[in-house]
Image: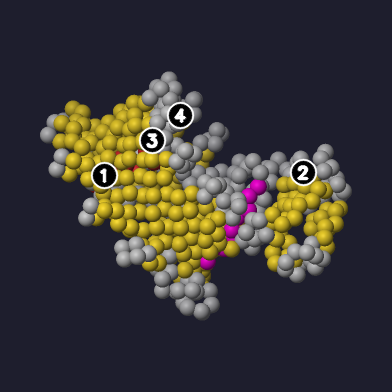
Amino acid sequence: MKAQILLITFLCVFGCNLQAQNQQHNATLPSGPEQVSSGFNPPQPGFKPDHMVVPAKRNMFDSSGYVWKWDTIMCYNVASGANPFQRATRTYNSFGEQLTILYERRQGSLAWENYAREADAYDSAGNWVYQLQEIWQNNSWVKYQKQEFVYNTNGDQVDWKRVFWDSTAWDNGWHYSWHFDANGLNDTCMFQQGQDSLWVNQWLWIPTYDGNGYLTSSLMYTWLNNDWEVTSRDSSTYNATGNHLTLLRQVLINSSWVNTYVQTNSWDTAGNCLSALYQLWQNNTWENNQYNVYTYDPAGNKVMEIWQNWSNGAWVNGHRILYDYDTSINLLSETSQDWVNAAWRNAYTTQYTYDSWGNSLTAKVLKGFNGWQPYDGGLDVYANHERDMVLQGEMYRYEAVIDSILVFIEPTRSLSEGQVTLYPNPAHSRIYISSPATSTDQNGSLTLYDLRGQMVLTKQIVNETTGIDVSGLNPGVYFVRFSNDRMTRVLKLVKE
């Protein structure tokens, strides 16, 4: 997409394709010899970040049941060929929240060496409250950066700080703070930049809502001469179902509001954004700048988006993205194309495979200027049909390895109340599973899955201890899912 610099922040905040999407926190991934990046896209000097950027809770599990997740991802780049050059290893707590992630690298077939790591902590409500990132230098772990989060009693995030280690002490990086009114609406957002041990005001955002809770206007203040000065305002309109129709940005010049740009969206009856028109205020009139068009399949999945630029009085194709899904609505491929010499030319594609629970098992990125070739770029990792994390740069494919299992356990339950025992393990011909006798459902169920998520055996449970013949299973690793009316547990079984 070749949008003008003036529109970059505007497109990121108000693009139709971002409507109604939840923020996902992306785990740390080393992106260079001296740098660790968390995928948050932290503000750069002179840049006014999006006031609505709030990292989500770091809970990777579906609280309505259970999911299973990867423990290790093996990463390959063009130079490493068939040998992984990096691996990422995760650990979780009993509630499925990430506790640690370790990155290791190696050269060729040499031993794995530490590269970077991250540790996370949560409060009793499952809110992500702390993260420490470290890098491996001179055979020891060295602090890199730290993040801290604070929530109000309603679970709204009200504070987010990031600080950086300068070899002797923590230096302030940047700081967001939010306030919410009695209706749970965000009524202020302040951003501060760090200067050594101080926080210095940068900008303040104050919104206004209508009776339906839709954001209709907002004022942006900038900290100048030790005081807040209003610098810009946004005004929005909506249709009857709450879809965003227009957004007008104006700046204050010599005590008068001056137009800068406007976005106009169109929607179908299902609430899918069909188009977004961007116009700039030039010579006291609105001039076309960019036009985005979106198409969907019958299930409402976006299958194509096209960016067009205004040139010599006509819309000219610039860029498009094609999306392909499987029957479970997992993203199989995302292909970018550029308009070159009056035809679409392949640029890049990312391709994924999944297990039956929507966890991505493999992924690769290719460039297509002269036929599809491996390309060292960035790839997403999906878990439970949702984006889990972003692996940033320097690789063309990965393989997810599932070595153990994590299961959602209700916070009101202690671990001892839900103990399920599986033995012997490893097993040859027969296994036994013992479960608590306190359940009101004496007819629980047990299901075995292979590593690809395919069901290979199922059995009803009628006693506290049940024996199961597994002699017909091939040797390997299986997952045993036990479920009754009060809990679900998944255990790993090794069949010899």
Along the line of sight, the residue nearer the viewer: 464 or 300: 300
Q: Earlier in the sequence, mark 4 or mark 3?
A: 4
Res. 484 mark? 2
Say whether marks 4 and 2 touch (CB < 8 Å).
Answer: no
The residue depicted at 85 percent of the width and 53 percent of the height is 466
Q: CA distance from mark 4 to mark 3?
A: 24 Å
The residue depicted at 40 percent of the width and 31 percent of the height is 268
What SS does tag 4 mark? loop
Q: CA distance from mark 4 to mark 1?
A: 35 Å
Name the residue furthest top.
211
Q: Relative to residue 309, is residue 328 drawn left or right? A: right
The percent coordinates of residue 122 (x first, y second) are 58, 47
Say whether marks 2 and 3 touch (CB < 8 Å).
Answer: no
Q: Earlier in the sequence, mark 1 or mark 3?
A: 3
The span picked out in magenta is: 66-74
Q: Earlier in the sequence, mark 2 or mark 3?
A: 3
Q: Write down the residue under mark 4.
A: 185
Q: Write down the residue under mark 3.
A: 273
Along the line of sight, the residue nearer the viewer: 430 or 202: 430
The residue depicted at 26 percent of the width and 53 percent of the height is 343
Q: Amino acid at mark 3?
A: Cys
Q: Relative to residue 341, is residue 128 drawn left or right? A: right
* Residue 165 visible, this angle: no
The residue depicted at 34 percent of the width and 29 percent of the height is 245
Color scheme of the displayed model = secondary structure
Tell me if residue 252 comes above or below residue 359 in the rendering: above
Q: Write down the residue under mark 1.
A: 308
Q: Earlier in the sequence, mark 4 or mark 1?
A: 4
Q: Residue 69 colored magenta?
A: yes
Nearer the observer: mark 4 or 3; the answer is 3
